[in-house]
Structure formats: C-alpha cells, structure tokens
Image: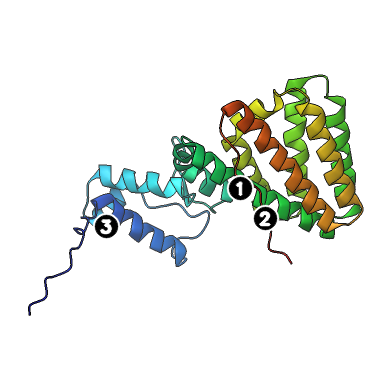
Amino acid sequence: MSMRPAATAPIRRQRIYEEVERRLEDDITTGRLKVGDAVPSERDLMQRFGVGRPAVREALLALQRKGLVRIGAGERTRVSRPTIDAVVDGVSGAVRLILATPEGVRDLQQARRFFECALARYVAQHAAPEDIARLRSRLAANKAALGDPAAFERTDVEFHYEIALCAGNPIFPSLHQATVGWLTQQRTISLMQPGALRSAYAFHERVFEAIAARDPDAAEAAMQAHLGAVEQYYWKTAGAPARPAGRRTTASR
C-alpha cells in the first residue's frame, strides 16, 4: 500500500533585504561590529553583498526596529544597544490588533494582573526605605487629586509606575509603561464610573500599607483585588463580563 506524501506548506522565498539583515545582525551579535561602531556605508554594503540600495536600506530599517542600530539624519549609522523599549515598540502594532477583540482585552488584562501582582509581592519583600518613601509621596499625590479626574488618572499611573521602579529592574518600568499605553481605554473608562476614583485610591492605600509593612501576601492580594475591580468597572461599561480572576495570579507559593 503506497503512502501519500504529507501535505506541506510552501517554503517562503526569502527577500533579499532579509538576508542582508541576517548577515549584519550576525556581525553585531558575534562582536565583529560593537556597540558604537559605525556600520559600513550603503555603498560598501551594496558592494559587499552584491545587492541594490533599496535592499540595504530595508535591512538597516529592520535592524533599527530591533534596536540594533541607530540611524541619524546626516550621520553615520551606528550599532546601538537594544533596549526593552525598542522590543516593546516593535510588538505594539500586534498588541493593538489583539485589543480589537473583547477576548484580546481580557488576555491583556490577565497578563497585567499577573505582572503587577508579582511586582507588588516582590517590592514588599525587597524595597529599600527610600523606595517606600517615594511610594508614600506618590500615594499622597494620588489622594490630593481625588477631586480632579484627569489629575487622578495621571497620579494613578505614577503610583503603579513607582512600584515598578521600586523593584530595581530596568525592564519592569518599560513593561509597565507599555501595558499602561495598551490599556489606556480601560483606565479612562473604569475611572468614569461613579465612586471609581475613591475605590481606586482605597486600593492604592491597601497596596502601599502592605508593602510598607513588608507583607508580600497582603500586597499581592490587595493588587489582585484592585485590578479585578478595575476590570469589573471597565466591563460594566463595555457591556461584557470580565474574566473571573480565580486563584491568585502568581505562582510564588
């Protein structure tokens, strides 16, 4: 009995600029081109790879989107150190597409809850006294803004951002800023609900008090309850049920 060959997808033909990009990226990752080094000129790259100017320019733009090179007007293109901001910016378009559906919004809400609950827990265990002092100042500013929705929204973001800073890892504030940008609509809508500002502040106070008391369980639980309430406010307006929070989102125990 003869076996029919398995169906396979056609192999995508690689575009010329992608090969140029791959080779230049290899030069950077292996150290042949180091951070700060000038990338060879477009003419030199055209001669080296035997390609046209459009392929070289597309390759350099692709490397810039990855944060591997810096292209300046009238200046030589230079190798740069990739940052988490560049990585996040590169996926922002895809995230906006995810947010186009209610299920995508729920997925991102859950990811934010997981991330911020873990942050609150970690900061309660590791924050320095000066970190807690800064967080107390952010909380005071948030309380002072209770009568001004726009100022409250700004100080709300600053309070959560300070928690990310307290963790002492430069990646965390960048991830926080990304999720804040992606979930801007959620925050604005949820804070429009009657009583939402005072509710949010009360949760911020609970989170702060747990962190200041060095109680990671209470800090995690307070953040979990806070973000769950924000989601409920949002879906009450959006007209769809929020995804149940269920068990605590971190697996720290």
What amino acid type should be assigned to the residue bearing mark 2?
Answer: Thr
Up/down of 120 relative to 141, above or below: below
Tell me: 51 left or right of 238.
left
Tell me: 177 left or right of 71.
right
Instruction: Name the mark on residue 252.
Output: none
Residue identified by numbered label 3: 48
Which residue appears at 49% of the width and 49% of the height? 67
The reply to whether callout 2 and callout 3 are in contact (CB within 8 Å) is no
Name of the residue lying farthest toward the top: 148
Residue identified by numbered label 2: 249
Quarter location, residue 93:
top left
Up/down of 6 relative to 51, above or below: below
Which residue appears at 61% of the width and 47% of the height? 110
What amino acid type should be assigned to the residue bearing mark 1?
Answer: Gln
Residue 15 x %, y %: 24, 51
Distance, label 1 to label 3, CA atoms, is 48 Å
Which residue appears at 60% of the width and 49% of the height? 111
Q: Total number of numbered labels? A: 3
Residue identified by numbered label 1: 110
Residue 168 x %, y %: 75, 55
Distance, label 2 to label 1, CA atoms, is 8 Å
2 or 3: tag closer to the N-terminus: 3
Residue 170 x %, y %: 68, 52
Quarter location, residue 200:
top right
